[in-house]
Image: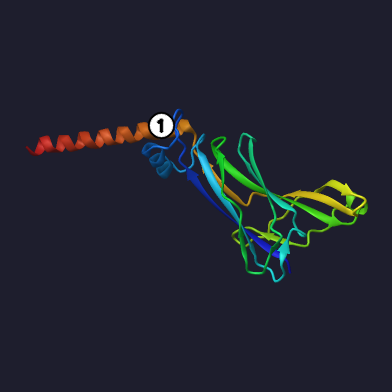
Amino acid sequence: MKAIRLEVAIRPTPAPRKGRNKSSWVDRSRSRIFRFVEGDLYTYQVKVRNIGDEPVGAEDLLRLEFEWEFPTKQVNLRAFPFPQSIEPGALHAFPEVDHRILSSGFALLYVRTYRIAKGGIEHVLTEPALELEIQDARGQVVPFESGETVGVDMKGGTTSHEARSRFAFENFHALASTDIKQYVLILIAIVALALGAAFGLLNYLK
């Protein structure tokens, strides 16, 4: 059986404020405390693990495209050519990718598959079955929508097909920049109340 598992690691990346080349300790602290914030950067890396008992390679998948969709319907896209071959039990790591967080709310990660199938005109209207099981990091099989034919090579007797996963297999939640300001104001108010109570207690004990 041919099967792969997609493992995704996501982390917030401190972004320098306008006019600066490097992130400051304030930027790094905000990233550690609030994690993902609208307008900041995030970094992700996808690893493909062959969990089947047969090699998987470019003959099965030509490339994978990762699509982050935000509530505003804006998307971040990045495509990678699939390795020539991944042996059973082996792991292939794609390079890390940095993207801008385009809006607050949940960012959903979908995957698109591109593959070449043997057979010409008979596959234009009927997509050949994908003889490869794709799982998410939890071991759940990722279903795909009906794909579409994106190319036909009559001379070579092959067709190119694209398909998109029916559901997002990873996500993260981002705060709005206005939320951060509100949290900071609330934190300042709490600190002020705590200091006021402490000074009042000290005056009472004198």
* Residue at x 16% of width, y 34% of height: 200
Q: Position of residue 19 (x, y in %)?
A: 45, 28
Residue type at tag 1: Gln
Q: From the image, which quarter does the C terminus lie in?
A: top left
User: Which one is nearer the viewer's eye here, 45 or 175?
Assistant: 45
Residue in the foreground of this view, choosing between 67 and 80: 80
Residue found at x 69% / y 68%: 52
Q: Quadrant location of residue 68?
A: top right
Horizontal side, residue 75 vs residue 113: left or right: left
Figure label count: 1
The image shows residue 203, relative to residue 109, as above or below, that is: above
Which residue was labeled with disc 1? 182
Q: Quadrant of the N terminus?
A: bottom right
Residue in the image at 49% along x and 44% along y: 12
Furthest-left residue in this view = 206
Is 29 positioned to the left or the right of 156 in the image? left
The residue lying furthest to the bottom in this view is 53
Rate crowding at label 1 as few (under 14), some (14 to 19) or many (20 or more) other CA atoms within 10 Å: few
Residue 155: x %, y % from top left = 93, 51
Q: Which one is in front, 75 or 23? A: 23
Color style of the picture: rainbow
Give the residue at x 47% y 37%.
15
State the SS at label 1.
Answer: helix
Note whether 121 is above or below 174 in the view shown: below
Above-or-below relation of 47 to 38:
below
Q: Residue furthest top?
A: 19
- The x, y position of residue 8, in whole percent, is 58, 54
Relative image position of residue 116 (x, y in whole percent): 81, 54
